[in-house]
Amino acid sequence: MEKHNILPILKSLRIVNDSGAIFQTQQDCLNWTNKVLPLLKYDQTHYEDFRYNAQFMEYEVLSNSRRMKHINAMLGIVQQAVIELENNIEGDKTPKDTTEAPKEKHNISKPPWYQRPIGMIGIGVTN
């Protein structure tokens, strides 16, 4: 789906909560996540973050405060996606590799282990 087609759908699914319950039932929340998640595939970061938080909606034993933490994160992701699409901001297509090769501090060649000095050796005598 093209980005310009995603924006109106995401806007219609965006939830702005001033007060009261966001969802009436857990099933309503799951239905909402199932509609939003495929729309976020255009941006790998949004998709993965939303999917991570959405998985917690399936747990019935999760407390309301814990569940709200994840719901608020998902609402924020949708809001951010809408703003980015409105402003034509490009998101991450693929996750970035942040690992770098370790840098050598000194370019001193070390002798092999068998040529290194042994150091101090302690010998003790016991009765």
Image (tube, helix red, strand yellow):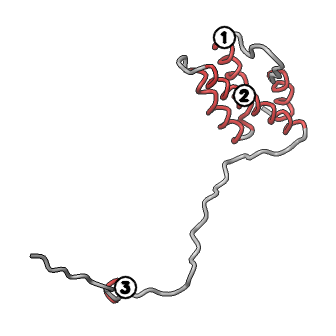
Tell me how far mark 2 sits from mark 1, CA to CA: 16 Å
Residue kind at label 1, given as amino acid type: Thr
Q: Nearer the viewer, residue 9 or 15?
A: 15
**Location of residue 125 in the rendering, given as x and y in whole percent from the top left corner:** 14, 80
The residue located at (35%, 87%) in the rendering is 116
Which residue lies under the disc numbered 3?
112
Quadrant of the image containing the N terminus: top right
> Residue 91 appears in which quarter of the rendering?
top right
Residue assigned mark 1: 25
Mark 2 to mark 3: distance in Å? 57 Å
Q: Position of residue 36 (x, y in %)?
A: 73, 25
What's the residue at 81%, 24% (across, down)?
14
User: Measured along the vertical axis of the image, is residue 106 above or below residue 65?
Assistant: below
N-terminal label among 1 and 3: 1
Q: Is residue 91 above or below residue 13?
A: below
The kind of secondary structure element at disc 3 is: loop
Q: Position of residue 53 (x, y in %)?
A: 64, 30
Question: Which residue, as the protein is rendered here, is positioned at the far front?
Answer: 127
Q: Earlier in the sequence, mark 2 or mark 3?
A: 2
Q: Given contact means CB atoms under 8 Å apart, are the residues at marks 2 and 1 in contact?
A: no
Q: Which residue is outermost to the right?
A: 87
Mark seen at residue 72: 2
Q: Secondary structure at mark 1?
A: loop
Q: Earlier in the sequence, mark 2 or mark 1?
A: 1
Dot 3 amino acid type: Pro
Q: Amino acid at mark 2?
A: Asn
Quarter of the figure with residue 104: bottom right
Q: Is 96 on the left-hand or right-hand side of 87?
A: left
Task: From this view, report whether residue 118 is shown above or below residue 17.
Answer: below
